[in-house]
């Protein structure tokens, strides 16, 4: 290496120029500073460039300079708020790409999805990620709120933060719900039809509310467009705005709450002093966030690729056919459960509105100054009771509860549901030899002696079918019941399977049957 | 190592793992898409089969064999091999099916062979033209019909009986000695099974799980108090059912569905053969 004076000058100039560039890119951090950061050394300059960063950079100015050590304890926050916003960003990015392949019209919407799945590389992964993110966001929003409630973190200066959080809970639910309709399949169509029928029950302006929401008495092209615009424009904008407010208050105004024991002075001064130590954004919080993001993405990617999670897609929406066992999305089961308890207006509109009002008002109602769970038994009791009620109501909202289906319909629906796979469709195609299989006459073993390896799958399903029918006969639901399973060769690679149940009722012979066509290459997913 | 360094190392490891998952998974993307496309077609055929059964089978037969003199067969070699040339269609076979099913036919293109179901000869099925089906449903039906292509046999179109040979509608007219084997062949070639396959397996006149064959059924129906026809023997009952189907319609079936032209199209020998065949089925 040449060691002349001019060369030294040059090297110094290069170093200066590089440093300038690096500082411009990192908003004030020099190369030396970055090295110190990675080594875990203290700041190299004064004023602390790691704080100056937050003043210079636009993106960094809403990030916290530091959190207190106590508030970053994993078992205090479980990072629930972080993951909620993580899911929101996953939704933003996957959603933007999905929009490229989607057309919001009843004629095209379903085909868009089919095309996305079978003609776009990684299309299925994208769709599954978007769906998983949506469900994750709903779950984590709820858990985040529950945690905030149980640790009493909504009190005093955090009252309004709680308020914006409740707004975000509803924005999340409506975002998720509005996206539900877009695939335009039977699941989507009927779940949203049930959901929006709630608007009809609103007093005074129910009809108008319904019309505004659906764009017509029933959901059609107008309704789909409205839900689409809600989903991709209005609600994301609202979410970004409210998330910004919510987050700004946490990061720049009052920080994450300390664990209750520390704030309520239930610990020694040393512990409290330690809990008040600063954990700087750079490098600790930033590294942690990036790490959690990478972790979250890794888990999500694994779940949608090899974890077997797939967003459902049923038959294309058909306004003329209401499938049996239609239900709202799971996060609205509680509302369906309430509707089963009484009047639609009272249970579907008035009581939920009061509950929502209470949820908003919790910080203003609860005047108990303490945050420790042991010092607020009443509030914690109500919280636990609320969660239990929610779970019970959700159970009541599923079709399992209090919906009477005639025995024959129930048996055949469980055997071969109108939507989804069910036992019957899961039988491999080559184990469906044509024939008439009569319950209690055809033996349930060695049903297909003509097949080399028999048909264990068919035998299992037929045994189940036999047992269900016999149970119903013994239980008196199917007087003089008889049942057959008829399998016919219908076309090349296509069979027609007809489960049929005949019974006596009120002096007449009743029949219930369902014709199911099964194609060899239908692919059961 | 400090916590920052641990997180950076683990993070890099996770990024590598995630990238590998995506890479390995991506190697199979083309196969996955092909499988899914096949599955989508298969489901379309399943849906189409149910729609065909509900909307088309009344005329074109449950197995698409058509009704002689009324509706053309679709499960037919000629339909897949020559029909497009005959009508000068420039698009694909599937387009042809979709176009015909969507808009129907005001008049029959082969009025001497297939008269169709009246005026229009075939109704329009697309909801754009006042029909009951959406476009995607018509596509499903087309997929189902196209699935006959690999296996379709040539359906022979029955020629009307010559003048003076037709059996007419008088069930008391004497019939020659019937041949059951010839009757069985006739039952297949005349496309009776297009409609008469409501039994669980095979044609409706065979004995099946809960029913005896048509030979026995003919004898018992005669004595049914609701019987409205003029026959007094099982032979006459079957004769009447063929040449004058509206004389007595079995409970649960609609009237005017079976063509009433067999008296003009079949000879006495044909009817005698058919009756002889049907009576063998007990």
Image (spheres, coloured by chain):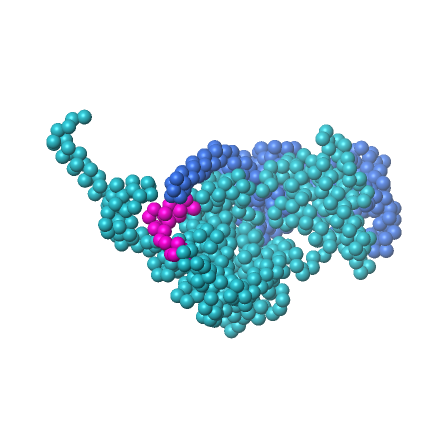
Chain colours: A cyan, B blue
With respect to residue A143, does A339 lie above or below?
A: below
| Residue farthest left in this picture | A5
**Residue depicted at x 73% and y 39%:** A459
- The question of residue A283 being in magenta is answered with yes
Front-lying residue, A21 or B129 = A21
Q: Quadrant of the N terminus of chain A?
A: top left
Q: Is residue A394 magenta?
A: no
Is residue A57 left or right of B7 when viewed as pictured? left
Out of B154 and A186, give the one closest to the viewer: A186
Left/right of residue A315 with respect to residue A474 in the rendered view: left
User: Residue at point 51% right, 37% down?
Assistant: B33
Q: Which residues are magenta?
A: A272-292
Residue at image coords 48%, 52%: A75
Where does the image place residue A174, in percent across and percent down from the top left?
A: 48, 59
Q: Residue A415: in sight, yes or no?
A: yes
Q: In the visual, does A456 lie left or right of A36? A: right
């Amino acid at each position: 290496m040449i060691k002349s004076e001019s060369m030294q000058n040059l090297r110094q100039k290069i170093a200066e120029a590089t440093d300038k560039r690096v500082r411009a890119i990192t908003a004030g951090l020099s190369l030396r500073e970055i090295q110190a950061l990675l080594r875990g050394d203290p700041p190299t300059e004064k004023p602390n460039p790691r704080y100056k960063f937050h003043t210079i950079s636009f993106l960094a100015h809403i990030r916290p300079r530091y959190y207190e050590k106590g508030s970053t304890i994993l078992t205090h926050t479980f990072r629930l708020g972080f993951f909620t916003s993580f899911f929101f960003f996953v939704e933003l990015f996957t959603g933007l790409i999905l929009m490229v392949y989607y057309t919001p019209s009843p004629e095209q919407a379903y085909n868009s999805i089919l095309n996305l799945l079978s003609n776009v590389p990684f299309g299925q992964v994208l769709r599954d990620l978007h769906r998983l993110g949506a469900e994750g966001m709903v779950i984590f929003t709820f858990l985040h709120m529950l945690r905030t409630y149980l640790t009493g973190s909504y009190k005093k200066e955090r009252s309004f933060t709680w308020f914006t959080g409740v707004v975000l809970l509803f924005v999340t639910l409506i975002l998720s719900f509005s996206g539900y309709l877009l695939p335009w399949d039977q699941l989507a169509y009927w779940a949203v039809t049930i959901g929006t029928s709630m608007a009809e029950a609103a007093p005074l302006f129910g009809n108008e509310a319904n019309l505004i929401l659906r764009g017509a008495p029933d959901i059609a092209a107008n309704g789909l467009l409205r839900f689409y615009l809600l989903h991709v424009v209005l609600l994301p904008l609202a979410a970004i705005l409210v998330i910004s407010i919510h987050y700004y208050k946490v990061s720049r105004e009052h920080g994450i709450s300390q664990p209750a024991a520390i704030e309520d002075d239930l610990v020694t001064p040393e512990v409290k002093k330690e809990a008040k130590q600063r954990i700087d954004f750079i490098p600790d919080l930033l590294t942690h966030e990036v790490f959690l993001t990478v972790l979250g993405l890794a888990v999500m990617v694994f779940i949608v690729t090899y974890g077997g999670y797939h967003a459902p897609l049923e038959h294309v929406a058909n306004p003329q056919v209401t499938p049996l066992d239609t239900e709202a999305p799971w996060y609205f089961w509680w509302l369906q459960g309430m509707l089963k308890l009484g009047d639609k207006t009272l249970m579907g509109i008035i009581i939920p509105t009061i509950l929502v009002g209470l949820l908003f008002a919790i910080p203003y109602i609860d005047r108990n100054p303490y945050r420790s769970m042991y010092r607020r038994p009443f509030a914690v009791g109500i919280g636990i009771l609320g969660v239990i009620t929610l779970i019970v109501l959700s159970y009541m909202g599923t079709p399992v509860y209090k919906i009477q289906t005639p025995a024959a319909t129930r048996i055949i629906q469980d055997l071969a549901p109108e939507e989804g796979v069910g036992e019957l469709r899961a039988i491999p195609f080559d184990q469906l030899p044509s024939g008439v299989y009569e319950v209690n006459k055809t033996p349930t073993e060695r049903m297909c002696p003509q097949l080399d390896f028999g048909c264990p799958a068919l035998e299992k399903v037929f045994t189940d079918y036999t047992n269900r029918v016999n149970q119903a006969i013994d239980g008196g639901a199917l007087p003089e019941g008889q049942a057959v399973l008829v399998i016919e060769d219908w076309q090349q690679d296509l069979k027609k399977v007809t489960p049929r149940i005949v019974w006596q009722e009120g002096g007449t012979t009743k029949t219930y049957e369902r014709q199911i066509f099964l194609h060899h290459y239908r692919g059961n997913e | 190592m400090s916590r920052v360094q641990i997180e950076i190392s683990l993070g890099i490891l996770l990024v590598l793992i995630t990238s590998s998952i995506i890479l390995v998974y991506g190697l199979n993307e083309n196969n996955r898409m092909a499988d899914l496309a096949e599955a989508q077609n298969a489901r379309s055929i399943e849906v189409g089969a149910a729609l065909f059964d509900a909307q088309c089978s009344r005329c074109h037969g449950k197995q698409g064999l058509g009704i002689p003199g009324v509706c053309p067969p679709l499960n037919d070699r000629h339909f897949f091999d020559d029909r497009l040339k005959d009508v000068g269609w420039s698009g694909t076979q599937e387009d042809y099916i979709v176009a015909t099913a969507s808009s129907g036919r005001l008049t029959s293109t082969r009025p001497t062979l297939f008269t169709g179901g009246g005026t229009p000869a075939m109704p329009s099925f697309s909801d754009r033209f006042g029909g009951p089906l959406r476009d995607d449903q018509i596509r499903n039906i087309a997929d189902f019909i196209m699935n006959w292509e690999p296996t379709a046999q040539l359906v022979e179109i029955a020629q009307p009986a010559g003048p003076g040979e037709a059996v007419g509608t008088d069930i008391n007219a004497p019939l020659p000695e019937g041949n059951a084997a010839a009757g069985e062949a006739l039952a297949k070639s005349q496309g009776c099974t297009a409609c008469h396959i409501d039994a669980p397996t095979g044609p409706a006149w065979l004995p099946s799980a809960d029913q005896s064959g048509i030979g026995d059924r003919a004898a018992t129906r005669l004595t049914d108090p609701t019987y409205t026809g003029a026959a007094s023997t099982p032979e006459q009952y079957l004769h009447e059912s063929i040449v004058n189907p509206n004389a007595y319609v079995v409970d649960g079936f609609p009237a005017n569905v079976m063509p009433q032209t067999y008296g003009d199209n079949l000879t006495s020998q044909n009817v005698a053969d058919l009756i002889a065949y049907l009576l063998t089925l007990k």
